[in-house]
Amino acid sequence: MVAYHRFTEKLNKEIEEMEHEDNGHEWKMDTGRPVEIPKLDDQMAIEKGANFLGEVIILSIAASILVTGYVGPKKIKEAEQEKRRREKHEHLAKEIRDLHVTVKDLLKEGREKRS
């Protein structure tokens, strides 16, 4: 239990040190020395924002192309299977109608022979 307590104290101390900020400086994680973070002027901020937005748009287009390429063939395959099922169903329905007509004709012939 003592080792756990020492570990958590040390971890909390390291976290506090990493979160420390002083006069526009941010402490670098492993070196313990402050690193100067330059401020962005308006033009640079607009440029970086535009670059970010452009990358998001390009990534979105690429992702949609990948998804379409993955989903498209599946939908085509499912549509073909559905078409085959429909054709088979229509063929079976036609055969049933034909058999129904044949049975009616046979019953009619049987009645005529008895009379």
Image (cartoon, rainbow, N blue to C red):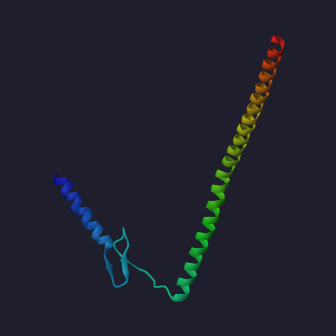
Task: Tell me which corner region of the image, top left, top right, bottom left or bottom right, holds residue 30.
Answer: bottom left
**53 or 93, which lies in front?**
93
| Closer to us: 13 or 112 | 112
Query: Among all residues in the image, which is located at the extreme top?
Result: 114
Q: Position of residue 34 (x, y in %)?
A: 36, 78
Residue extending furthest toward the front = 115
For the residue pair 107 and 31, the one nearer the viewer reads as 107
Describe residue 6's horizontal placement relative to residue 56 as left or right: left
How many numbered circles does the render carry? 0
Q: Give me the residue at 81% from left, 11% from top.
A: 114
Taking the view exactly as shown, the residue that stands out farthest to the bottom is 42
- Quadrant of the image occupied by residue 32: bottom left
Q: Could you tell me which residue is drawn at 72 percent across and 35 percent down?
A: 89
Q: Is residue 1 above or below residue 41?
A: above
Residue 26 image point, x, y percent? 37, 77
Above or below 107: residue 57: below
Q: Examine the rendered structure and indicate whether residue 68 appears above or below residue 34.
A: above
User: Residue placed at 61% from the left, 60% from the top?
Assistant: 63
Query: What is the quadrant of residue 44 in the picture?
Result: bottom right
Is 77 displayed left or right of 37 in the figure? Answer: right
Q: Is residue 105 left or right of residue 85?
A: right
Q: Residue at x 23, y 59 (%)?
A: 8
Q: Position of residue 73 (x, y in %)?
A: 69, 48
Q: Is residue 36 above or below residue 85?
A: below
Residue 14's spot in the image, x, y percent? 28, 66
Looking at the rendering, in which quadrant would you find the C terminus? top right
